[in-house]
Image (cartoon, grey):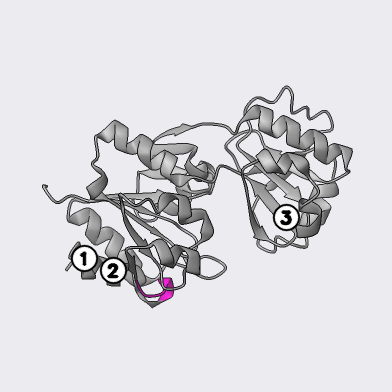
Amino acid sequence: MSDKKFFFFDIDGTIAVDIPRRVPESTKRTLNKLKENGHFVSIATGRMYVMTTEFCEQFGIENMVTDGGKGIVIDGNPNIEPLDHSMMLTLTKELDEKNIPWSVCIKNERKWYMKDDRFHNAMKDVIKFKNYMQTIIKEDLDIEKEKNIFKGFVFIDIETEKTIKSLENTTYTRYHSDYIIIEADDKSVGIKKIMDIMNINDKDVVVFGDNTNDIKMFRPEWTKIAMGNSVQQLKEIADFVTKDADDDGIEFACKYFGWID
């Protein structure tokens, strides 16, 4: 297929809308039609691999960029790298010194580990939906010995965040006023890995996104499509702004460019 495109879709706010997450029927149709037309379809998300697989199974999607660019999956075969260990060691030491509760994922699974119940108690009123993470209290949790950390969570408000020096050298995202998530924040890294493995040309890459954590994957050499509900910063660097995610935005863009009928 000479005009084959390689699509990388953000999940939350792009493919999925609302809480709990719902995928519009038009988006489901479009993803299936793209695959039928011979295009490569992949997710590109900050979510951990384990938090992405169930979602992708609904649509038969076997290609992913996960963990904010740290993980890639091609044809169902995952390769997930942990976060930088020295970064996590420095950060958690300072958090302990300042009595700020935190947790980490030390395996690619839906479990967050913590030394005591302070983080769990703080977060239980924030995370309203069930089955987000299983809490594991591990009193002897030693970050110096835990070499593989895939995600970190810190219960910290915006003002206190400014006082944590180690955060200056930490990659993290704030989705909520009460906590931050320690995660890689450059999905383009994972996309480039897939491009190298599959020998993909820049002109054939198409990225869809809606939020600030998609900015780094909106590279000038790729086709960049922002959802109508996107933040303004993303719209400003997009090649095309489509309709809202819950207003058939993905389908509208794919028809506009002729990728589907």
Whole-angstrom CA distance, mark 2 to mark 1, is 6 Å
Is 245 in the magenta?
Answer: yes
Label 3 crowding class (10 Å Cα cut-off): few <14, some 14-19, many 20+? Answer: many
The dot on residue 144 is: none
Q: Which residue is identified by label 1?
A: 257
Q: Is 32 positioned to the left or the right of 49 in the image?
A: left
Q: State if disc 1 and disc 2 touch (CB < 8 Å).
A: yes
Hey, which quadrant is residue 82 in on the image? top right
Q: Is 118 positioned to the left or the right of 131 in the image?
A: right
Give me the residue at 52% from left, 59% from top. 212
Q: Which residue is identified by label 2?
A: 253
Q: Which residue is identified by label 3?
A: 179
Label 2 crowding class (10 Å Cα cut-off): few <14, some 14-19, many 20+? Answer: many
| Amino acid at pointer 3 | Tyr
> In the image, which residues are magenta?
242-246
Nearer-the-camera pick, 113 or 193? 193
- Percent x, y for residue 200? 24, 39
